[in-house]
Image: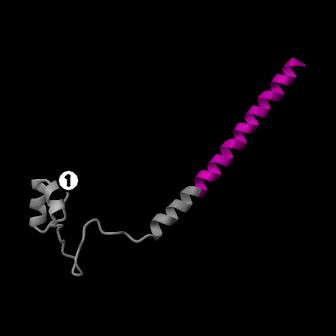
Amino acid sequence: MIGLKKSVAALAIAGSMLVGGVTGAVLYATTTIAASAATTAASPTPAAPATANGKFVSNETAAHEATESAAREAQENAGQVPTVP
């Protein structure tokens, strides 16, 4: 009788793990599909400001200039989109 109770308990545990795993997989797939649809539908935003003709325009405000590195300033002065902090 004790062996039967252990078997029933093991079966219940295995069944609950199976149901939990299937539920988790379904929820994960649903959120992944929703997130994928949300990211592909959004239009990309430019990383740096640009004029209508697509040329890079650097930020020359005093607050910005005080915090940027010499390498970044050199890239901005050359008309390049900065790649260094």
Expressed as whole percent of the image width and height from the top left, the position of residue 82 reads 18, 61
Which residue is the extreme one toward the top?
2
Image point 24% across, 70% down: which residue? 49
Expressed as whole percent of the image width and height from the top left, the position of residue 51 reads 22, 78
Image point 87% across, 23% down: which residue? 4
Which residue is the extreme one toward the right?
1
Which residue is the extreme one toward the bottom?
52
Secondary structure mostly taken by the magenta-highlighted segment of the chain: helix
Q: Is residue 40 left or right of residue 22?
A: left
Q: Is residue 36 left or right of residue 15?
A: left
Q: Which residues are magenta?
A: 1-30
Q: Is residue 40 left or right of residue 24?
A: left
Expressed as whole percent of the image width and height from the top left, the position of residue 32 reads 54, 56
Q: Is residue 16 covered in magenta? A: yes
Asked which quadrant contains residue 68, the reply is bottom left
Q: Which residue is at the front of the view, 63 or 32?
A: 63
Badge 1 crowding class, 10 Å Cα cut-off, few under 14, some 14 to 19, many 20 or more, is few
Which residue is the extreme one toward the front?
63
Image point 18% across, 60% down: which residue? 63
Q: Is residue 76 covered in magenta? A: no
Which residue is the site of mark 1? Answer: 85
Callout 1, which amino acid?
Pro
Q: Is residue 70 left or right of residue 52?
A: left
Asked which quadrant contains residue 42, the reply is bottom left
